[in-house]
Amino acid sequence: MKFTELTIHTTTEGSELIADIAWRYTNYGVAISDVKDVIALQENKVLYWDYMDENLLSARQDVLVKAFIPKDETPSTLIKIREDLDELSKNCSGILSLGSLETATREVEGDDWIGIWKAHFRPLHIGEKIVVCPEWIAYDKKPCEQVVKLDSNMAFGTGEHETTSMCLKLLQEYLTPSSTCIDVGCGSGILGISAVKLGAKYAYLTDVDFVAVESAKHNAQINGVENKVTVAHANLLDNADIKGDIILANITAEILCGLAPSIPKNLNAGGTLILSGIIESRLQTVIDAFSAQNLKLEKTVRDGEWFALSFRL
């Protein structure tokens, strides 16, 4: 089977958003290549190289998002992706740098691609209790661990990105067995599913993207938590009757600020709000927006370029 390898030039800040767009139109793999990840591994002493090109430390480098699209679907898919990129660029103008968004394509042989892509994924430990594991890998968990299985072929949100891992770590701090959790913009469903696996009595997940909704439902099933998880194809939190002890929202700062006035109606008294997907230049704006709703900032967490916040009502 032949594939088109689509490469999109962007920035570190924009890479996850671009990858999300790509995932809407392919089930065959999306990859992010960011030289900053290599530099961070070296500086943090996670990996060592005998030689590293010194230009890596100084030269401006685009981040590359690669998506693999079946050749016969390429013409129509490229049009849709370009439309979504243009819309994202318009919405992020003056707020978030997305880079050039230039694209390039080449034909690749895809017979072995899925196997190679799956071989890249390994169990990911996040915090003290959560292990995110691809569905196709057998993992022997320790007594204190909760394994969250994901079918990463279906949609975005594997826990590898800093914004997701910070949410999962904060969730482990605040969750109690009596908690009802709401995940706004759920993607793969990783946050809501993790909440139930950690002991929450119920999780309500919502997303405006149909692919994300179907992915979250599928992932809830393979984790055996579908009876405690509801996934709604809805516009954020339209339903005022849905109440949560913990609300999680890993979205862009612009959308978070727009969501701020509606949060109190869905958060139980004394409840916790966990936000992520925030870059430094937008951090104070987000804090101000939610503080104005009588939410008290409790914690600010940073991982790389990204910030996560926890508030108490």
Image (cartoon, grey):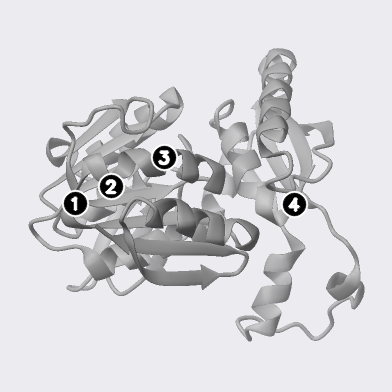
Could you say whether the residue bearing mark 4 is in a helix, strand or loop? loop
Label 3 or label 4, whichever lies nearer to me, is 3
Q: Position of residue 124 (x, y in %)?
A: 42, 64
Q: Horizontally, is 298 left or right of 6 in the view?
A: left
Residue type marked 4 = Thr
CA separation, marks 3 and 4? 25 Å
Q: Residue at x 90, y 78 (%)?
A: 54
Residue type marked 2 = Gly
> Which residue was labeled with disc 1?
196
* Residue 123 visible: no
Q: Are marks 2 and 4 in contact (CB under 8 Å)?
A: no
Dividing the picture into quadrants, the one containing residue 133 is: bottom left
> Which residue was labeled with disc 2?
192
CA separation, marks 3 and 1? 24 Å
Label 3 or label 2, whichever lies nearer to me, is 3
Q: Are marks 3 and 1 in contact (CB under 8 Å)?
A: no
The numbered mark, 3 or 1, whose residue comes first in the sequence reads: 1
Q: Is residue 19 above or below residue 127?
A: above
Dividing the picture into quadrants, the one containing residue 40 is: bottom right
Could you say whether the residue bearing mark 3 is in a helix, strand or loop? helix
Using the image, tell me which numbered label, if any, was put on residue 11: 4
CA separation, marks 2 and 1? 7 Å
> Which residue was labeled with disc 3?
259
Q: Quadrant of the C terminus?
A: bottom left
